[in-house]
Image (tube, grey):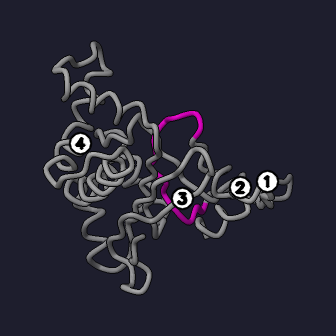
Amino acid sequence: MLLSGNQPFTAGAPEHPNQDAARRAETAPVQRPFAVLFGCSDSRLAAEIIFDRGLGDLFVVRAAGHVAGPEMLGSIEYGIQVLNCPLVVVLGHDSCGAVGAACAALQDGMAPAGYIRDVVERVSPSVLAARAAGHTEPDEILAEHVRHTVDLLLDRSRLLAEKVAAGQVAVVGLCYRLADGSAQLVAARGLEPSLTTTP
């Protein structure tokens, strides 16, 4: 549904489903989103817009560089445990400031000040893993960071890992391109083999 919704958005002809007064009234008493979307806070990464969805469709959790602190993990667990979402999506994007800052900090040894440093430190393992695998291009580093985040969620959230193992929840990673608005699958855990082919 997300990738299907992304197509009309990239074509410049979004359908804007579930965005009318009837949907507002329908979702006022209760929410039943079909996916938890854990993405970067970047202002250009508005999930409901780029996937052409509406009110009540997505339970969105966002942090710079989609770093998974306790509050993020708790929100994701709320989505799968309380709201019964069968899908968790990690959404990264090109030209990510957090990934760029981590690359710069590892290159020149100068970490930013304040809590931005915490974000950079949480992204740095992904950059190091990408470099260890011989990946140096920004798109390759981004894809590694998305995959690393998918694996980190499963490693840190016992609840999520149990639900994936039981076939109740799937976790996927998508990379979004700012220029053309397209999203590509780069990681999948808990999906049927026919759905896990990556580009």
The answer for how far apart the CA atoms under marks 4 and 2 are is: 34 Å
Q: Is residue 186 above or below residue 38?
A: below
Question: What residue appears at the point 40 percent right and 60 percent down from the top-left corner?
Answer: 173
Q: Earlier in the sequence, mark 2 or mark 3?
A: 2
Residue 69 picture quarter: top left
Looking at the image, tell me whether mark 1 or mark 2 is earlier in sequence order.
1
Residues drawn in magenta:
32-44
Q: Residue 19 got which mark?
A: 1
Q: Earlier in the sequence, mark 3 or mark 4?
A: 4
- Relative placement, left or right, of 70 versus 64 is left
Answer whether labels 3 and 4 touch (C-beta < 8 Å): no
Query: In terms of secondary structure, where does tag 2 sit?
Result: loop
Q: Is the Cβ of the residue at disc 1 closer than 8 Å to that at disc 2?
A: yes
Q: Which of the numbered marks, if any, corresponds to residue 54?
A: 2
Q: Residue furthest right?
A: 21
Of residues 166 and 102, the one nearer the viewer is: 102
Dot 4 falls on a residue whose secondary structure is: helix
Query: Image check: 179 left or right of 79?
Result: right
Mark positioned earlier in the residue sequence (1 or 4): 1
Residue at image position (39%, 84%) is: 192
**Label disc, if present, on residue 127 of the rendered structure:** 4
Q: Mark 4 is on which residue type?
A: Val
Is 34 one of the magenta-colored residues?
A: yes
